[in-house]
Image (spheres, rainbow, N blue to C red):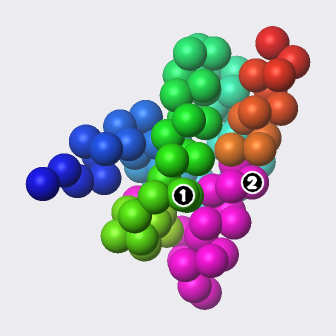
Amino acid sequence: MQNFRDTFPETYTLLTAWFADDGKDNKVIKEFISEESAEMQKKVIEEGKALLNGEEKYRKQIGDLANRAFDNQQQSEEWLQNIIVQIEKNTANS
């Protein structure tokens, strides 16, 4: 049985490494975009969209992996969707 890390490896890295401690999401997103390759960004976009359209068991883990306290699962999904949109804007301009 696959886990989150196996199923969405790049998104797992984004959530656990980039967002683990810093509460300033916009700063983290800008740093991710400036430091990661376009290929990595595209993988995160693809995986993130698959995650948001996939199994609920994985979507329930978003907040915990990112070390964020959301009121509910919908908020965590909206948060991730916003991150994906910001990364997409960057890749469209590249």
Location of residue 70 in the rendering, given as x and y in whole percent from the top left corner: 59, 79
Asked whether, in this view, residue 12 is left or right of residue 40, the answer is left
Location of residue 37 in the rendering, given as x and y in whole percent from the top left corner: 59, 14
Q: Quadrant of residue 9?
A: top left
Asked whether, in this view, residue 29 is left or right of residue 11, the answer is right
Residue under circle 2? Answer: 82
Q: Which mark is residue 39?
A: none
Q: Could you tell me which secondary element the residue under label 2 belongs to? A: helix
User: Which residue: 51% across, 47% down?
Assistant: 50
Location of residue 93 in the rendering, given as x and y in whole percent from the top left corner: 87, 18
Looking at the rendering, in which quadrant would you find the C terminus? top right
Quote the CA–CA distance across marks 1 and 2. Answer: 15 Å
Q: Say if the magenta span includes residue 40.
A: no
Q: Is residue 47 above or below residue 36?
A: below
Location of residue 7 in the rendering, given as x and y in whole percent from the top left corner: 31, 44
Other residues around mark 1 within 10 Å, as few (<14) / some (14–19) / many (≥20):
few
Looking at the rendering, in which quadrant would you find the N terminus? bottom left
Residue under circle 1? Answer: 53
Magenta region: 65-83
User: Which residue: 40% across, 64% down?
Assistant: 55
Q: Is residue 55 above or below residue 2?
A: below
